Image (tube, helix red, strand yellow):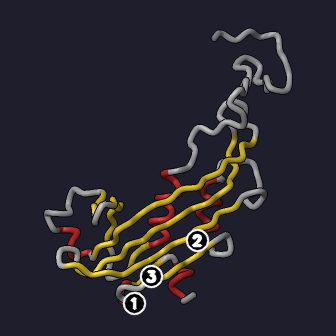
Amino acid sequence: MSKQDHSGKLNLKSLPMGQTQFLKHDLKTKWIEQILVEAQENSTIDPQTQSTIELELEVTRQQAPRLKDYLIIEGKINSTYQLPCVRCLENSILKMDTDFSVCVLDEDLEDDEAFQDLDSYIIGDKEYQLYFTKKRQFNLESCVHEQFFMNVEYLPLHDENCLGLCPECGVNRNLETCKHVTKQ
């Protein structure tokens, strides 16, 4: 892999036209590790314990009259991460397996009326989320960060039948009983 693969940036000009490059990243890549650390920052757990994140990308540079020089990125994020259960605060081990499709256009097109209010663009029969370069560089790190956090479980439960904490005394009702009665 080239240096750009680890930096979180893709230089549009350095990618060969019409060819697909396959990129893989995991916790050994610092910016990938930081995404997982950020996801778990409010947890009282070790971010490395039972937590993983793997990213697979297919990046293709293409040209078309309307889109000019652009990238198609097909991505897959696989992750196991930990967050506290929203009911009892016990660790929840969660899994993410998500795919995403991105079309990256040159920044010159960002001001074009045809693209101004669009979040996605259809090429052929497939819809792609729309992103733009800055000085012919694409911030892959920012894109992957966004894709990851759009798919994080925001109300994690360690068990769907979790009884939670007693609102009166704070005891974990999954482990102990207390004298307080909860209204349903």
Residue 99 locus on image (x, y percent): 50, 59
Q: Which disc is residue 20 wearing?
A: 3
Residue 16 has which mark? Answer: 1
Q: Nearer the viewer, residue 149 or 99?
A: 99
Which circle, 1 or 2, is nearer the viewer?
A: 1
Residue at the location (65% across, 9% down)? 183
**Dot 1 or dot 2, earlier in sequence:** 1
Of 50 and 89, nearer the camera is 50
Residue kind at label 1, given as amino acid type: Pro
Q: Which mark is residue 88?
A: none
Horizontal arrangement in the rendering, residue 171 relative to residue 133 (left or right): right
Mark 1 secondary-structure assignment: loop
Choose top left, top right, bottom left or bottom right for residue 173. Answer: top right
**The N terminus - image quarter:** bottom right
Which residue is depicted at the point 65% across and 34% down?
86
Mark 2 sits on what residue? 31
Q: Tag 2 or tag 3, which sits nearer the N-term? A: 3
Q: Amino acid at mark 2?
A: Trp
- Label 1 close to label 3 by CB (< 8 Å): no
Q: Give the quarter of the figure containing the C terminus.
A: top right
Q: Residue furthest left?
A: 113
Note whether 14 is above or below 72 in the view shown. Answer: below
Crowdedness of circle 1 by 10 Å Cα count: few (<14), some, many (20+)?
few
Three-letter amino acid code of the residue under disc 3 = Thr
Nearest to the observer: residue 165 or residue 101: 101
